[in-house]
Image: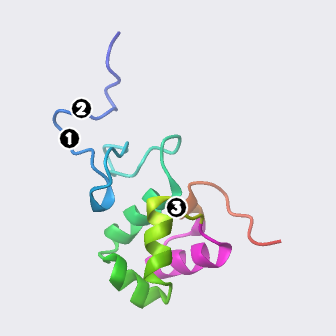
């Protein structure tokens, strides 16, 4: 069976994710995790790193707690609507980009 040419070769590409979080499937063109395999925390960490923030700097600029950021990025806690909106505003991206899906807001 032929290898998908769009899939990165683990022998030649880095597969560790943000903060050395083990295996991290990604789009080779952007290093953004594949939608089907990604975690929301990995997407937030990707955009935080892209913006050049450490977790601590992101907490200071966004006024989100460092503990919440760490737990969300590790997948230990789901972000609230307020967390997502604040993170997106601070990172200058849409909530849809952070979540990888349409955002319906709080009802």
Q: Can residue 92 be seen in this view?
A: no
Could you tell me residue 66's position as x and y percent?
43, 81
Extreme top residue here? 1
Q: Which of 80 and 49 is in front in this view?
A: 80
User: Which residue corresponds to the image point at 48% horizontal and 41% vertical from the top-left?
Assistant: 37
- The residue pinned by badge 3 equals 76
- Image height of 2 relative to 54, above or below: above
Q: Which of marks 1 and 3 is in front?
A: 3
Residue 81 appearing in the image = yes
Q: Earlier in the sequence, mark 2 or mark 3?
A: 2
Dominant SS of magenta comes to helix
The residue sitting at 36% across, 76% down in the picture is 55
Residue 13: which disc?
A: 1
Q: Which residue: 42% across, 48% down?
A: 33
Identify the residue position indicated by label 2 in the image. Answer: 9
Is residue 16 part of the magenta span, yes or no?
no
Give the left or right position of residue 8, taking residue 100 as reference: left
Between marks 1 and 2, how big is the CA–CA gap? 6 Å
Secondary element at tag 1: loop
Q: Do the residues labelled 1 and 2 touch (CB within 8 Å)?
A: yes
Residue 47 point in image, percent of width and height: 40, 66
Please rate how many residues cluster around mark 3, counting C-alpha atoms within 10 Å: few if below 14, some from 14 to 19, many from 20. Answer: few
Magenta segment, which residues?
A: 79-95
């Amino acid at each position: 069976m032929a290898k998908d040419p769009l899939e990165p070769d683990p022998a030649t590409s880095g597969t560790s994710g943000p903060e050395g979080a083990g295996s991290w499937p990604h789009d080779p063109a952007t290093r953004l995790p594949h939608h089907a395999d990604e975690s929301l925390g990995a997407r937030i960490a990707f955009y935080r790193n892209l913006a050049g923030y450490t977790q601590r700097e992101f907490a200071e600029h966004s006024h989100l707690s460092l503990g919440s950021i760490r737990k969300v990025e590790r997948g230990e806690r789901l972000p609230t609507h307020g967390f997502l909106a604040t993170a997106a505003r601070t990172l200058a991206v849409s909530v849809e980009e952070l979540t990888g899906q349409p955002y319906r807001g709080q009802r």
